[in-house]
Amino acid sequence: MSTYDVLVVGGRVAGAATAMLLARAGARVALIERAAYGSDTVSTHGLMRAGVLQLSRWGLLDELAGTPPIRCTTFHYTDREPEEVAIRASGGVDALYAPRRQLLDRVLVDAAAAACVQVRHETAVTALLHDEHGRVNGVRVRHRTRRTEDLRAGITVGADGIRSTVAAATGAPVVRRGQSRSAILYRYYSNVRAAGYEFAYAAGSGAGLIPTNDGLTCVFVATTPARMRALRRGGTEQAFATLLAETSTDLAYRAFAARAADRIHGWAGAAGFVRRSYGPGWALVGDAGYYKDPITTHGITDALRDAELLSDALTGGADLESYQATRDRLSSALFDATESVASYAWSLDEVRVRLRDVSAAMRDEVAHFSL
Ligand SMILES: Cc1cc2nc3c(=O)[nH]c(=O)nc-3n(C[C@H](O)[C@H](O)[C@H](O)COP(=O)(O)OP(=O)(O)OC[C@H]3O[C@@H](n4cnc5c(N)ncnc54)[C@H](O)[C@@H]3O)c2cc1C
């Protein structure tokens, strides 16, 4: 039986970053991921300033070479001219990036392996193990061959996403639940003319362009799940085209003049939540502990932030209560603002105010890591 200081369940942005940071601080860590090495996941991938700042501090930004720098964000509304916001240089960050997940997640996993984390892909955690006092002290895993194995550790970290096995097994209570949810469709196009991130809003819908690797641009549309279900009765292609055209004729014109590089990907929507994220022998990080609607494109940035907060708490002697308190302090305004944007119950004047709230909410996290 193998024994570690920390077992991390889930090997994407939250888990791989947590494992890497813990191992760099000297911990003996194993990272267990059900999916294959280098696989994609259902997610667009716009990073915000704090996420880029962290990748830079961790020495990983150069590994994303080939990902185009984003130097401007443009907001489109159906009732006025577009508003451009230049990405100003600060805190060592002069551009944002939107690396594909199969690249970003792989870079983080490779950095974890380079720091001596034992990385195990295609291995699923099926149960938690406990000592005689009920404290979590490891996991049972099932390999691709169906062989099972028990692994022991002082702390087990659930970085296993919104349907977290670790959260379910520990009964981690939801302490805050959101109401809003976006249903999203996205697809990659070659050679779309895009000025950087471009986000568009119309009554009841949103859309956007996110330039990424290999000359591709992710084009997404979003609305309420009920509206999306109704539109998809006429076919997914039709729903995508209708939502894009009604949200921004400009974005639709540019996307449809380009070549579609793959199929349409869909997300049905899930309500946000905050879970109590620690207990005897366990902790949660990333979406497993705190999830909000993707419309504000901030989940990856949050996951990287929380990986660092958790790693600092586990290696620096801070308690897990303060990890959770810092996470909640840095996320609560963004959670509120995201809830409002994802409600789609706004006028264009109102959504502009809410987007400014989103932007203001991001300042604290940047300040936290710029110190
Ligand atoms: C449609 C959509 C668009 C999005 N767009 C953006 C965006 O533009 N920008 C942004 O910042 N965020 C975006 N997000 C949010 C972002 O994808 C998430 O916040 C982020 O993936 C969370 O990372 P994570 O590592 O916590 O969890 P995940 O990425 O969900 O990874 C969890 C991992 O755990 C593994 N796992 C689960 N259970 C087990 C188990 N029992 N054993 C072993 N492994 C297990 C899974 O295989 C998975 O790989 C979007 C999300 C969606 C759905």
Image (spheres, rainbow, N blue to C red):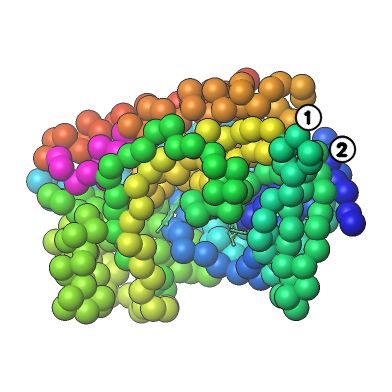
Q: Which mark, by number, is residue 26?
A: 2
Mark 1–mark 2 CB contact (< 8 Å) = yes
Which image quadrant: the C terminus? top right
Question: As displayed, is residue 94 above or below residue 225?
Answer: above
Residue 226 at least partly seen = yes
Q: Could you tell me which secondary element the residue under label 2 belongs to? A: loop
Query: Can you give x and y, in whole percent of width and height, for residue 314 in the image?
Result: 74, 31
Q: Is residue 240 magenta?
A: no
Disc 1 packing (10 Å; few <14; some 14–19; many ≥20): some
Disc 2 packing (10 Å; few <14; some 14–19; many ≥20): few
Q: Could you tell me which secondary element the residue under label 1 belongs to? A: helix
Question: As displayed, is residue 168 above or below residue 155?
Answer: below
Q: Is residue 338 magenta?
A: yes
Please state if 47 lies on the left or on the right of 284 as rendered: left
Determine which residue is flagged by label 1: 315
Q: Of label 1 and label 2, which has the lower sequence position?
A: 2
- Nearer the observer, 47 or 283: 283
Query: Can you give x and y, in whole percent of width and height, for residue 238 in the image?
Result: 20, 76
Please state if 49 lies on the left or on the right of 227 as rendered: right
Query: Can you give x and y, in whole percent of width and height, for residue 306 in the image?
Result: 59, 36
